[in-house]
Structure formats: C-alpha cells, structure tokens
Amino acid sequence: MKIFFRIGALRALWGSSRLAWRLMGDRRTPLGARLLLGLAVALIVSPINWIPSAIPILGQMEDLALLALALKLFFKYVPAELRLEHQAALSRT
C-alpha cells in the first residue's frame, strides 16, 4: 500500500513541476514567486546542501522535501485564476 502512496506522491510532484514550469514562463507570474522557486531550485542543484546527497536516501529526501515546499509556496503566491488557466491548458495536452 505504501508503494502506491509513493507513486501517487511522485506523480503529483511531477504534475506540480510541469505546472510551475509553465507558470515560470508566463510574464503575469509575480516576480517574488519566480525568485522563490528559482532560489529553491538553485539550492537543490547546488553542491552545498544541508544533508549531502552522498548520504543514501536522506540527501534525496531533503531535496524532494525542499522542492515540495518551494512548489507549495510558489503556488500560494501565484494568482488563482492564472494557475487555473495553466492547469486547464495542461489537462488539454
């Protein structure tokens, strides 16, 4: 049962990432939200981490948790109508 939760969580993270990618390309997205997500992604790909990626599982989980938190905050600061517009466009593809 736990494997289905993990697959569902990863699928949701993938869908949120696709939506965020589209919103980052939209000029109507607030600059603060863009900067927040950009800084989080830069921290994830940076060689400087709180928990090194060399530590199996913990390093990757830290990266996933940071990405999930950044996406949640990003969507909080994006206007709802803009987010819904891009969600509808993604569902058509």
Image (cartoon, rainbow, N blue to C red):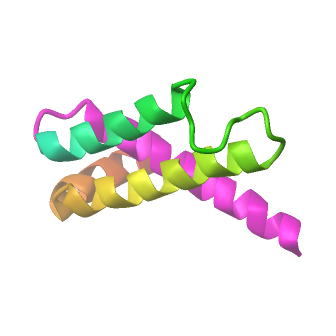
The answer, for residue 30, to whether it is visible in the render is yes
Q: Residue furthest bottom?
A: 1
- Of residues 91 and 55, the one drawn nearer to the viewer in this rendering: 55
Place of residue 50 in the rendered image (x, y in percent of width and height, measured from the top left): 57, 44
Determine which quarter of the picture holds residue 81: bottom left
Q: Give the magenta part as a residue range.
A: 1-29
* Residue 19 left/right relative to 49: left
* Residue 47 left/right relative to 6: left
Give the mark count: 0
- Of residues 87 and 10, the one drawn nearer to the viewer in this rendering: 10
- Of residues 62 and 76, the one drawn nearer to the viewer in this rendering: 62
* Residue 14 left/right relative to 82: right
Q: Who's the residue at 28% across and 44% down the image?
A: 36
Q: Who's the residue at 71% across and 43% down the image?
A: 59
Magenta: predominant secondary structure element?
Answer: helix
Place of residue 33 in the rendered image (x, y in percent of width and height, measured from the top left): 22, 47
The answer, for residue 29, to whether it is visible in the render is no
Place of residue 48 in the rendered image (x, y in percent of width and height, measured from the top left): 54, 29
Place of residue 46 in the rendered image (x, y in percent of width and height, measured from the top left): 51, 25
> Residue 70 colored magenta?
no
Q: Who's the residue at 65% across and 53% down the image?
A: 11
Q: Is residue 33 above or below residue 81?
A: above
* Residue 57 left/right relative to 69: right
Q: Is residue 24 above or below residue 85?
A: above
Q: Who's the residue at 23% across and 37% down the image?
A: 35
The N terminus, quarter of image: bottom right
Q: Residue furthest top?
A: 47
> Residue 4 colored magenta?
yes
